[in-house]
Image: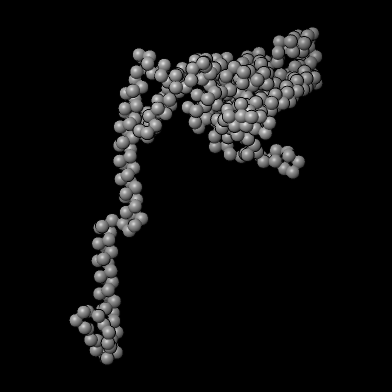
Amino acid sequence: MHTQRNSVHPEYIEDGRESYVARHLFRNSVPTFLDYKHNEGPFKLVCDDFRPGNILVDHNLKITAICDWEWTYAAPYQQFYSAPRWLLLKAPEEWDRKEPDDEGEGDDDMLKSYRKKLDLFLKVMEEEEHKRASDKLSSPLVSQPDGPQNGATTSPAHWYHPMMDEGDTPHDEQMAAFFADKPFTPTHTPMEVNKQEDEPLSSLMRKSLSNGQFWFNECLRAYDSDLMYWLRLRVWHHAPDLSKEECVKEWATIPSNLHIEGFIEKKLADYEEYQKELTALNDEKAANVNGISKDQKENEKVSEAKQGAMAGEEVAAVAAEMGKVILTPPDGGMDQIF
Protein backbone atom coordinates (compact mmCIF):
# COMPACT_ATOMS: atom_id res chain seq x y z
CA MET A 1 0.00 0.00 0.00
CA HIS A 2 2.91 2.36 0.63
CA THR A 3 4.31 2.05 -2.90
CA GLN A 4 1.07 1.74 -4.86
CA ARG A 5 0.01 5.33 -5.45
CA ASN A 6 -3.66 4.60 -6.06
CA SER A 7 -4.10 2.17 -3.16
CA VAL A 8 -6.51 4.57 -1.39
CA HIS A 9 -9.34 6.10 -3.42
CA PRO A 10 -10.83 9.44 -2.23
CA GLU A 11 -14.33 8.00 -2.51
CA TYR A 12 -13.42 4.87 -0.54
CA ILE A 13 -11.26 6.17 2.29
CA GLU A 14 -12.78 3.78 4.81
CA ASP A 15 -11.81 0.84 2.60
CA GLY A 16 -8.26 2.16 2.69
CA ARG A 17 -8.32 2.26 6.49
CA GLU A 18 -9.66 -1.29 6.63
CA SER A 19 -6.90 -2.55 4.33
CA TYR A 20 -4.22 -0.74 6.31
CA VAL A 21 -5.44 -2.15 9.63
CA ALA A 22 -5.88 -5.64 8.17
CA ARG A 23 -2.26 -5.77 7.06
CA HIS A 24 -0.97 -4.61 10.42
CA LEU A 25 -3.12 -7.15 12.27
CA PHE A 26 -2.06 -9.86 9.84
CA ARG A 27 1.59 -9.08 10.51
CA ASN A 28 0.88 -9.22 14.24
CA SER A 29 -0.67 -12.67 13.81
CA VAL A 30 2.57 -14.25 12.58
CA PRO A 31 3.75 -15.40 16.05
CA THR A 32 0.33 -16.97 16.62
CA PHE A 33 0.35 -19.14 13.51
CA LEU A 34 4.03 -19.66 12.79
CA ASP A 35 4.96 -23.29 13.37
CA TYR A 36 8.53 -22.94 14.59
CA LYS A 37 9.02 -26.70 14.52
CA HIS A 38 8.22 -26.86 10.82
CA ASN A 39 9.65 -23.51 9.72
CA GLU A 40 13.09 -24.78 8.73
CA GLY A 41 14.34 -26.79 5.77
CA PRO A 42 14.36 -28.95 3.88
CA PHE A 43 11.87 -26.77 1.98
CA LYS A 44 9.11 -28.27 -0.13
CA LEU A 45 7.84 -27.51 -3.62
CA VAL A 46 4.53 -25.60 -3.41
CA CYS A 47 2.36 -24.58 -6.37
CA ASP A 48 -0.33 -22.01 -5.54
CA ASP A 49 -2.15 -22.69 -8.81
CA PHE A 50 -2.54 -26.42 -8.27
CA ARG A 51 -6.25 -27.06 -8.86
CA PRO A 52 -8.60 -29.33 -10.87
CA GLY A 53 -8.52 -26.98 -13.87
CA ASN A 54 -4.77 -27.53 -14.24
CA ILE A 55 -4.87 -31.34 -14.02
CA LEU A 56 -5.06 -33.32 -17.26
CA VAL A 57 -6.54 -36.84 -17.23
CA ASP A 58 -7.19 -39.56 -19.80
CA HIS A 59 -10.48 -41.34 -20.53
CA ASN A 60 -9.88 -43.54 -17.46
CA LEU A 61 -9.44 -40.46 -15.22
CA LYS A 62 -5.77 -41.29 -14.77
CA ILE A 63 -3.69 -38.15 -14.30
CA THR A 64 -1.43 -37.60 -17.29
CA ALA A 65 -0.05 -34.10 -16.67
CA ILE A 66 -0.07 -31.06 -14.39
CA CYS A 67 0.18 -27.64 -16.05
CA ASP A 68 0.58 -23.97 -15.03
CA TRP A 69 3.62 -24.06 -12.77
CA GLU A 70 4.43 -20.34 -12.85
CA TRP A 71 3.21 -19.85 -9.25
CA THR A 72 5.62 -22.46 -7.88
CA TYR A 73 8.18 -21.84 -5.16
CA ALA A 74 10.10 -23.51 -2.34
CA ALA A 75 8.36 -23.03 1.01
CA PRO A 76 8.71 -24.22 4.61
CA TYR A 77 7.07 -27.51 5.46
CA GLN A 78 4.33 -25.69 7.39
CA GLN A 79 2.94 -24.36 4.11
CA PHE A 80 3.22 -27.74 2.45
CA TYR A 81 1.13 -29.47 5.12
CA SER A 82 -1.69 -26.92 4.93
CA ALA A 83 -4.95 -28.64 4.03
CA PRO A 84 -5.30 -28.85 0.23
CA ARG A 85 -7.08 -25.77 -1.10
CA TRP A 86 -8.09 -27.42 -4.39
CA LEU A 87 -10.75 -29.84 -3.13
CA LEU A 88 -13.43 -27.41 -4.33
CA LEU A 89 -13.50 -25.78 -7.76
CA LYS A 90 -13.49 -22.35 -6.12
CA ALA A 91 -10.43 -21.09 -4.24
CA PRO A 92 -10.90 -20.41 -0.49
CA GLU A 93 -10.83 -16.65 -1.04
CA GLU A 94 -13.97 -17.08 -3.17
CA TRP A 95 -15.96 -18.93 -0.52
CA ASP A 96 -18.82 -16.57 0.22
CA ARG A 97 -20.29 -17.18 3.67
CA LYS A 98 -23.78 -16.53 2.30
CA GLU A 99 -23.50 -18.40 -0.99
CA PRO A 100 -25.55 -21.64 -0.91
CA ASP A 101 -24.40 -24.90 -2.39
CA ASP A 102 -26.62 -27.66 -3.75
CA GLU A 103 -27.68 -28.79 -0.29
CA GLY A 104 -27.48 -25.79 2.01
CA GLU A 105 -29.08 -22.41 2.48
CA GLY A 106 -26.05 -20.14 2.48
CA ASP A 107 -24.75 -20.40 6.04
CA ASP A 108 -21.10 -20.87 5.08
CA ASP A 109 -22.01 -23.86 2.96
CA MET A 110 -18.82 -23.66 0.91
CA LEU A 111 -16.78 -24.36 4.03
CA LYS A 112 -19.17 -27.16 5.03
CA SER A 113 -18.75 -28.76 1.61
CA TYR A 114 -15.00 -28.39 1.89
CA ARG A 115 -14.91 -30.11 5.29
CA LYS A 116 -16.79 -33.12 3.90
CA LYS A 117 -14.37 -33.48 1.00
CA LEU A 118 -11.37 -32.95 3.28
CA ASP A 119 -12.53 -35.76 5.58
CA LEU A 120 -12.74 -38.11 2.60
CA PHE A 121 -9.37 -36.97 1.26
CA LEU A 122 -7.62 -37.43 4.61
CA LYS A 123 -9.21 -40.83 5.14
CA VAL A 124 -7.66 -42.04 1.88
CA MET A 125 -4.34 -40.39 2.80
CA GLU A 126 -4.29 -42.10 6.20
CA GLU A 127 -4.87 -45.46 4.55
CA GLU A 128 -2.02 -44.78 2.15
CA GLU A 129 0.28 -43.66 4.97
CA HIS A 130 -0.48 -46.85 6.90
CA LYS A 131 0.14 -48.96 3.80
CA ARG A 132 3.48 -47.29 3.06
CA ALA A 133 4.63 -47.66 6.66
CA SER A 134 3.74 -51.36 6.56
CA ASP A 135 5.58 -51.85 3.28
CA LYS A 136 8.72 -50.22 4.68
CA LEU A 137 8.69 -52.34 7.81
CA SER A 138 8.35 -55.50 5.72
CA SER A 139 11.18 -54.60 3.29
CA PRO A 140 13.56 -57.59 2.75
CA LEU A 141 16.99 -57.48 4.32
CA VAL A 142 20.17 -58.36 2.47
CA SER A 143 23.52 -59.69 3.57
CA GLN A 144 26.46 -57.34 3.95
CA PRO A 145 28.76 -57.75 0.91
CA ASP A 146 31.88 -56.97 2.95
CA GLY A 147 30.84 -59.01 5.94
CA PRO A 148 28.62 -57.99 8.87
CA GLN A 149 29.70 -55.79 11.72
CA ASN A 150 29.44 -57.03 15.29
CA GLY A 151 28.41 -60.45 14.05
CA ALA A 152 25.17 -59.28 12.35
CA THR A 153 24.06 -61.13 9.21
CA THR A 154 21.77 -58.48 7.71
CA SER A 155 21.75 -54.75 7.12
CA PRO A 156 18.84 -52.36 7.62
CA ALA A 157 20.21 -49.94 5.01
CA HIS A 158 17.65 -51.07 2.45
CA TRP A 159 14.93 -50.18 4.91
CA TYR A 160 16.47 -46.85 5.88
CA HIS A 161 17.27 -45.39 2.48
CA PRO A 162 13.76 -45.34 0.94
CA MET A 163 12.42 -43.60 4.03
CA MET A 164 15.20 -41.03 3.86
CA ASP A 165 14.66 -40.43 0.13
CA GLU A 166 10.92 -39.90 0.64
CA GLY A 167 11.40 -37.55 3.58
CA ASP A 168 9.96 -39.88 6.24
CA THR A 169 11.24 -40.73 9.68
CA PRO A 170 10.35 -43.97 11.46
CA HIS A 171 8.64 -43.72 14.82
CA ASP A 172 10.50 -44.87 17.93
CA GLU A 173 8.32 -47.99 18.13
CA GLN A 174 9.10 -48.86 14.53
CA MET A 175 12.81 -48.43 15.07
CA ALA A 176 12.79 -50.45 18.28
CA ALA A 177 10.92 -53.31 16.61
CA PHE A 178 13.21 -53.25 13.62
CA PHE A 179 16.49 -53.18 15.53
CA ALA A 180 15.50 -55.90 17.97
CA ASP A 181 18.31 -58.50 17.95
CA LYS A 182 20.13 -56.49 15.25
CA PRO A 183 23.45 -55.25 16.64
CA PHE A 184 24.51 -53.86 13.25
CA THR A 185 24.80 -50.04 13.18
CA PRO A 186 24.26 -48.63 9.67
CA THR A 187 26.47 -45.91 8.26
CA HIS A 188 23.43 -43.93 7.10
CA THR A 189 20.98 -43.26 9.86
CA PRO A 190 17.74 -41.23 9.64
CA MET A 191 17.86 -40.23 13.29
CA GLU A 192 18.60 -36.59 12.38
CA VAL A 193 16.98 -36.52 8.94
CA ASN A 194 13.71 -34.60 8.63
CA LYS A 195 13.16 -34.81 12.35
CA GLN A 196 10.40 -32.21 12.08
CA GLU A 197 8.26 -34.56 9.97
CA ASP A 198 7.65 -37.17 12.64
CA GLU A 199 3.89 -36.43 12.65
CA PRO A 200 1.91 -37.88 9.72
CA LEU A 201 1.08 -35.43 6.96
CA SER A 202 -2.63 -36.25 7.24
CA SER A 203 -2.63 -35.29 10.91
CA LEU A 204 -0.90 -31.96 10.25
CA MET A 205 -3.36 -31.16 7.45
CA ARG A 206 -6.32 -31.86 9.69
CA LYS A 207 -4.90 -29.65 12.44
CA SER A 208 -4.22 -26.77 10.04
CA LEU A 209 -7.94 -26.32 9.46
CA SER A 210 -8.85 -26.66 13.13
CA ASN A 211 -6.24 -24.25 14.52
CA GLY A 212 -6.41 -21.48 11.88
CA GLN A 213 -3.09 -22.19 10.14
CA PHE A 214 -4.96 -23.03 6.94
CA TRP A 215 -6.43 -19.50 6.82
CA PHE A 216 -3.07 -17.96 7.70
CA ASN A 217 -1.47 -19.70 4.72
CA GLU A 218 -4.37 -18.64 2.50
CA CYS A 219 -3.81 -15.00 3.51
CA LEU A 220 -0.20 -15.36 2.40
CA ARG A 221 -1.18 -16.51 -1.08
CA ALA A 222 -4.58 -14.85 -1.70
CA TYR A 223 -4.96 -12.10 -4.30
CA ASP A 224 -7.25 -10.22 -1.90
CA SER A 225 -5.45 -10.91 1.36
CA ASP A 226 -7.34 -8.09 3.14
CA LEU A 227 -10.69 -9.74 2.43
CA MET A 228 -9.35 -13.14 3.45
CA TYR A 229 -8.08 -11.71 6.72
CA TRP A 230 -11.37 -10.03 7.69
CA LEU A 231 -13.53 -12.88 6.49
CA ARG A 232 -11.61 -15.86 7.87
CA LEU A 233 -8.41 -15.30 9.82
CA ARG A 234 -9.28 -12.48 12.23
CA VAL A 235 -11.67 -14.59 14.31
CA TRP A 236 -8.76 -16.86 15.21
CA HIS A 237 -6.60 -14.28 16.93
CA HIS A 238 -8.10 -10.79 17.26
CA ALA A 239 -11.40 -9.69 18.83
CA PRO A 240 -13.69 -12.31 17.26
CA ASP A 241 -16.74 -10.72 18.92
CA LEU A 242 -16.20 -7.33 17.29
CA SER A 243 -17.31 -6.32 13.82
CA LYS A 244 -14.76 -5.27 11.22
CA GLU A 245 -15.73 -1.62 11.67
CA GLU A 246 -15.32 -1.88 15.44
CA CYS A 247 -11.91 -3.51 15.06
CA VAL A 248 -10.68 -0.72 12.78
CA LYS A 249 -11.96 1.98 15.12
CA GLU A 250 -10.45 0.30 18.19
CA TRP A 251 -7.07 -0.25 16.52
CA ALA A 252 -6.88 3.31 15.13
CA THR A 253 -7.47 4.89 18.56
CA ILE A 254 -4.44 3.20 20.14
CA PRO A 255 -1.78 5.93 20.59
CA SER A 256 0.92 3.91 18.87
CA ASN A 257 -1.32 3.47 15.82
CA LEU A 258 -2.22 7.11 15.19
CA HIS A 259 0.08 7.03 12.14
CA ILE A 260 -2.87 5.68 10.17
CA GLU A 261 -4.27 9.18 9.56
CA GLY A 262 -0.92 10.45 8.27
CA PHE A 263 -0.76 7.44 5.99
CA ILE A 264 -4.26 8.13 4.59
CA GLU A 265 -3.39 11.80 3.93
CA LYS A 266 -0.22 10.80 2.08
CA LYS A 267 -2.06 8.24 -0.03
CA LEU A 268 -4.72 10.78 -1.01
CA ALA A 269 -1.96 13.14 -2.17
CA ASP A 270 -0.33 10.26 -4.05
CA TYR A 271 -3.64 9.48 -5.70
CA GLU A 272 -4.05 13.08 -6.88
CA GLU A 273 -0.60 13.11 -8.47
CA TYR A 274 -1.24 9.69 -9.96
CA GLN A 275 -4.46 10.90 -11.59
CA LYS A 276 -2.70 13.95 -13.09
CA GLU A 277 -0.03 11.79 -14.66
CA LEU A 278 -2.60 9.28 -15.87
CA THR A 279 -4.69 12.04 -17.48
CA ALA A 280 -1.63 13.42 -19.26
CA LEU A 281 -0.73 9.98 -20.57
CA ASN A 282 -4.29 9.40 -21.80
CA ASP A 283 -4.33 12.77 -23.57
CA GLU A 284 -1.06 12.00 -25.28
CA LYS A 285 -2.36 8.59 -26.32
CA ALA A 286 -5.56 10.16 -27.73
CA ALA A 287 -3.51 12.66 -29.74
CA ASN A 288 -1.46 9.84 -31.21
CA VAL A 289 -4.54 7.84 -32.13
CA ASN A 290 -6.36 10.80 -33.75
CA GLY A 291 -3.51 11.83 -35.90
CA ILE A 292 -0.65 12.86 -34.08
CA SER A 293 1.14 15.94 -32.85
CA LYS A 294 1.11 19.42 -34.50
CA ASP A 295 4.70 19.07 -35.65
CA GLN A 296 3.89 15.80 -37.35
CA LYS A 297 0.88 17.36 -39.08
CA GLU A 298 3.03 20.27 -40.39
CA ASN A 299 5.57 17.79 -41.67
CA GLU A 300 2.82 15.92 -43.47
CA LYS A 301 1.64 19.16 -45.19
CA VAL A 302 5.17 19.97 -46.37
CA SER A 303 5.59 16.43 -47.63
CA GLU A 304 2.32 16.58 -49.57
CA ALA A 305 3.34 19.90 -51.21
CA LYS A 306 6.66 18.44 -52.29
CA GLN A 307 4.96 15.39 -53.72
CA GLY A 308 2.53 17.64 -55.68
CA ALA A 309 5.38 19.73 -57.15
CA MET A 310 7.26 16.61 -58.16
CA ALA A 311 4.13 15.22 -59.83
CA GLY A 312 3.67 18.50 -61.78
CA GLU A 313 7.27 18.43 -62.94
CA GLU A 314 6.88 14.87 -64.16
CA VAL A 315 3.73 15.76 -66.15
CA ALA A 316 5.45 18.78 -67.72
CA ALA A 317 8.44 16.69 -68.76
CA VAL A 318 6.24 14.09 -70.42
CA ALA A 319 4.20 16.77 -72.22
CA ALA A 320 7.37 18.47 -73.50
CA GLU A 321 8.55 15.24 -74.96
CA MET A 322 5.24 14.83 -76.71
CA GLY A 323 5.54 18.38 -78.19
CA LYS A 324 2.42 19.62 -76.54
CA VAL A 325 1.74 22.76 -74.58
CA ILE A 326 0.28 22.75 -71.12
CA LEU A 327 -2.10 25.60 -70.30
CA THR A 328 -2.28 26.45 -66.65
CA PRO A 329 -5.37 28.44 -65.58
CA PRO A 330 -5.02 31.19 -62.97
CA ASP A 331 -6.29 28.91 -60.24
CA GLY A 332 -3.36 26.60 -60.73
CA GLY A 333 -5.35 23.71 -62.16
CA MET A 334 -4.45 21.80 -65.33
CA ASP A 335 -7.57 21.17 -67.38
CA GLN A 336 -6.43 21.23 -70.99
CA ILE A 337 -3.61 19.66 -72.90
CA PHE A 338 -3.11 20.59 -76.62
- Residue 136 visible in rendering: no
Using the rendered view, name the quadrant where residue 97 is placed: top right
Residue 247 drawn at (x, y percent): 45, 18
Depth order, front residue of 54/236: 236
Residue 201 drawn at (x, y percent): 66, 21
Residue 307 drawn at (x, y percent): 28, 71
Residue 176 drawn at (x, y percent): 74, 9
Depth order, front residue of 159/169: 169
Q: Is residue 255 toward the left or the right of residue 154 in the image?
A: left
Residue 190, placed above or below residue 310 = above
User: Image quadrant for the C terminus?
Assistant: bottom left
Residue depicted at 61% across the width and 20% down the height: 208
Q: Is residue 62 toward the left or the right of residue 259 in the image?
A: right
Residue 46, placed above or below residue 237 = below
Residue depicted at 75% across the width and 20% down the height: 130
Using the rendered view, name the quadrant where residue 165 is placed: top right
Depth order, front residue of 37/34: 34
How many labels, in total?
0
Residue 134, placed above or below residue 180 = below
Residue depicted at 47% across the width and 22% down the height: 244
Depth order, front residue of 123/40: 123
Q: Is residue 311 toward the left or the right of residue 176 in the image?
A: left
Residue 286, placed above or below residue 33 = below
